[in-house]
Image (cartoon, helix red, strand yellow):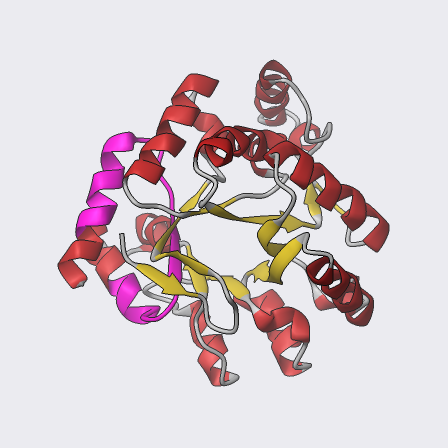
Amino acid sequence: MQSIQISNTNLKTSRFIFGTASLFNVGARKERLNLLSAAVDHGFTHFDLAPYYGFGMSERDMSFILKRHPFISVTTKVGIYSPGGENQSAASIFLRKLAGRIYSPISKPSINFSIAQAQISLEGSLRRLGRDHIELYMLHEPTWDLLNSEEWLKWLETKVQAGLVGNFGLALTADKLEPFLEKKSKLANVVQVLDSLDRKEADILPSYAKPLQITYGYLSAMYDRGPKISVEDALKAALGRNKDGAIIVSTKKIKRLEQYTKILKQIS
């Protein structure tokens, strides 16, 4: 798979990043690990995680892959947390998610952008991943009014200096991103932003003279609203929009991975 260097960073990733937001829904642990292993076999070298994904299970599953493939890099996040914590059993997670369909607060995440909680979260992510560092650490859907940005910047810079974090930034939607761009916040050094072929949300970045770095959401937007084109054509169009960055894709089916690599070969 093609690789690129994320602008403004020292981080090189596969052109497609494997997203794990729906990994827990793949099935039993063996099936989840088979999917992650197959993604590596198909050339994915960077995986997008968060403590909230699978209520901590995505990070725990990824630890097995990282032990076997130490060259793999990861993004994980801070600020959104799992109900019941990130160290629940698979049965507990399943029951909580199931009950949440009837009574949503049971599976609703908590939001906390305090530095004290961030320190706990970082230590937990490193422990679950079995790593001593995280290549890309992102504030997960923050809003400007929730943050003391200077406090956060200082804290993140100390983690970079300590070698615990390689790069940091924001993972969020365009409406939440704009105040950070307006204020020229250094927290927006790396931006992971929702984008689509019809609404072109990521165009907010070049409007502030910033490049598209990591984008996601193209296929889900297409299924919801259109344009009704093939997966292949949609991702080729997405690659045309984000020409120099990386795009997060995901799947619950191993056979889809080959399609992703073929798309990249066709445009190389």
- Relative to 10, is 165 above or below? above
Q: Quadrant of residue 139?
A: bottom right
Left or right: 54 as drawn, with respect to 226: right
Q: Is residue 188 magenta?
A: no
- Position of 97 with respect to 37 (left or right) is right
Looking at the image, residue 169 lies above or below residue 26: below
Quadrant of res 168: bottom right
Residue 242 placement (x, y as % from top left): 35, 68
Give the position of the C terminus as an image quadrant: bottom left
Whether residue 230 can be seen here: no
Left or right: residue 60 compared with residue 65:
right
**Segment colored magenta:** 237-262
Q: Position of residue 16 (x, y in %)?
A: 34, 53
The extreme top residue here reads 91
Seen in the picture, residue 177 relative to 76 is either above or below; the reply is: below
Percent position of residue 59, x then y: 57, 35
| Figure quadrant of residue 215 | bottom left
Point 57% across, 19% down: residue? 94
**Residue visible at 68% across and 52% down?**
164
